[in-house]
Image (spheres, helix red, strand yellow):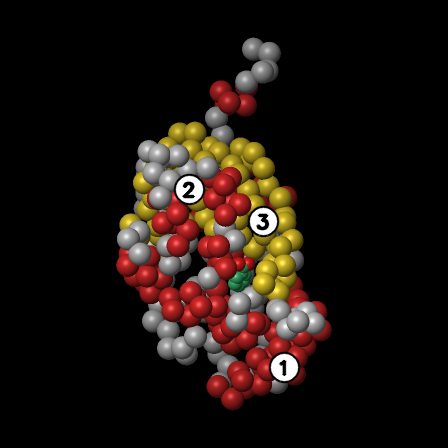
Amino acid sequence: MSAQTTSLPAAGQHWNAAGYATNAGFVPALGAPVAELLDARPGDRILDLGCGDGVLTAQLAARGATVIGVDASPDLVAAAVERGVEAQVMDAHALTFEAQFDAVFSNAALHWMREPDAVLAGVRRALKPGGRFIGEFGGHGNVAAIVTALRAALCANDAGEPAFAWFFPTADEYAARLAEHGFQVDQIALIPRPTPLPTGIGGWLRTFADPFLAQVDTGTRKRVLADTETLLRPALCDASGQWHADYVRLRFSARIFSSQHSMQGQPQ
Ligand code: BEZ
């Protein structure tokens, strides 16, 4: 991935569509289970929150749904539009939609959004009555080995102690937030998913570790990256040389709480 990036930072992160496609093409590819959970139908109006470069958004649209993608990164939104997806740059903490969607969908994006209550309030507003919110993102324990190694390498190189960059809640914590925002949670679970990295841990770190490295000078950054790789090799690289990231997904399905729905089967 080029060191040149053009997009808005999220928690110090910069995005580059070409680098993302090379180093993180597995992200939309591994979104199939959560897309199945969404089960988009022809005629559904769906908001794809954090649509990235639109690969998964296009697949949802191919099922006959009307899908609009939003993402904070102009570079990724431009890539999505080029793919033929309807997409716009928008901060997920300040969604501007009112009762327009049958479902809000999100894959591998909610962990970048540091104020989950602002996001959930916007999702709730964007949905029609009875609308669904289906998603998957990094949950508690996600990339724990990678974060620990990065912190150790930064410390060993006197490169400071960055604040934790991501939102990785437990299932109970996120279920409680969903309920506070008027959602009924149909399912929610943490799913460990060791994830093969097509360009090794180096590609992953160059694509995703800006929040830890943005303030570090070029020479130190090189040493931190090399030390991180050395620390992680025994845990995340197998005998054939294949690297895996220690991903833990939080997958959920929720709908706007309706007292009618919750009364079904209850004595009146
Ligand atoms: C994730 O998809 O879990 C993830 C990706 C990059 C940084 C942190 C988490």
| Figure check: 18 above or below 170 | below
Q: Which residue is drawn at 28% across and 53% down?
A: 84
Q: What residue do we see at 63% from left, 48% from top?
A: 190
Asked if residue 158 shows in the view, the reply is no
Residue at figure coordinates x 35%, y 34% from the top left: 42
Badge 2 crowding class, 10 Å Cα cut-off, few under 14, some 14 to 19, many 20 or more, is many
Residue 161: image location, x then y, percent:
59, 75
Horizontal side of residue 110 vs 232, given as left or right:
left
User: What kind of residue is marked 2?
Assistant: Val
Query: Percent from the top left, x then y, of residue 184?
Result: 53, 33
Nearer-the-camera pick, 158 or 22: 22
Of 162 and 261, which appears nearest the observer? 261
CA gap between label 3 and label 2 equals 16 Å
Instruction: Give me the disc on residue 29.
Output: none
Q: Name the residue under label 2.
A: 104
Distance in Å between CA atoms under marks 3 and 1: 29 Å
Is label 2 in a helix, a strand or a loop?
strand
Element on which disc 3 rests? strand
Q: What residue type is labelled 1?
A: Asp
Name the residue: 37% across, 77% down: 4
Q: Does the residue labelled 2 lie within 8 Å of ligand 1?
A: no
Residue kind at label 3, given as amino acid type: Leu
Image quadrant holding the C terminus, namely top right
The residue where tag 1 is placed is 227
Q: Earlier in the sequence, mark 3 or mark 2?
A: 2
Please name the residue that numbered disc 3 is placed on.
250
Label 3 CA crowd tier, 10 Å (few <14, some 14–19, many 20+): many
